[in-house]
Image (spheres, helix red, strand yellow):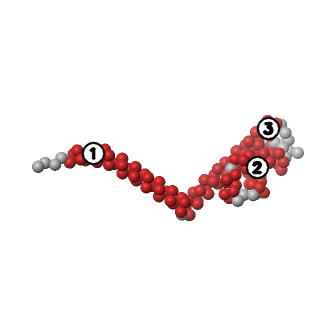
Amino acid sequence: MTVQFQELTLWIIAFGVPAISALAFALGKILVDWIKTKTPFGFLVSDDMVRGYLQEAINFGIGYATQKAKESSLEVKFDNAFLATVLQYVVERVPDALEHFGITPTALEAMVKARLGLLAPEVANLPKK
């Protein structure tokens, strides 16, 4: 009696390898999700992601307020219209990030003021009252 292993091997390759790959991928995703939610490493990933989009929102808010100030040809005083526009933009776009880090309006204002000269040098050239 002769046993042909070639056909059995082809079946295993054709159906077994994709099934094992799918199972390994699913188990890997479950493991990564568990690590993100149940270990300190997940908090680091989450904080970094939230911090990133908060920083982007502040940068975009400064750019938005700069453009709005240029279009309206208004004289800008940072403690007034310009700063209020940036703060409003950030509060509307990422309220969950502000809540996540417990950022108060005063702290947000300090963050924006700290970035005004560094991230948007053209703002420093706008007329001031």
Q: Name the one closer to the observer, 33 or 118.
A: 33
Disc 1 marks which residue? 11
Q: Of the residues tagged 1 and 2, which is closer to the observer?
A: 1
**Residue 40, percent from left and from top:** 56, 64
Q: Name the one closer to the observer, 66 or 92.
A: 92
- Quarter location, residue 98: bottom right
Which residue sits furthest left? 1
Q: Counting residues from the N terminus, which is met first, the one under dot 2 or under dot 3?
A: 3
Quarter of the C terminus within the rendering: top right
Question: Distance of mark 1 from mark 2, alpha carbons?
Answer: 62 Å
Q: Amino acid at mark 1?
A: Trp
Within 10 angstroms of label 3, few (less than 14), some, or many (20 or more) residues?
some
Within 10 angstroms of label 2, few (less than 14), some, or many (20 or more) residues?
many
Disc 2 marks which residue? 87
Q: Amino acid at mark 2?
A: Leu
Which residue lies at the image location 40% right of the left edge and 53% below the top edge?
A: 24
Which residue lies at the image location 25% right of the left edge and 47% below the top edge?
A: 9
Residue 110 visible in the picture = no
Q: Counting residues from the N terminus, which is met first, the one under dot 1 or under dot 2?
A: 1
Q: How many marks?
A: 3
Disc 3 marks which residue? 70
Question: Distance of mark 2 from mark 3, alpha carbons?
Answer: 18 Å
Question: Distance of mark 1 from mark 3, alpha carbons?
Answer: 69 Å
**Does 1 appear above or below 47?**
above
Left or right of 1? Residue 81 is right
Q: Are marks 1 and 2 in contact (CB under 8 Å)?
A: no
Q: Secondary structure at mark 2?
A: helix
**Residue 63, percent from left and from top:** 73, 43
Q: Name the one closer to the observer, 77 or 2.
A: 2
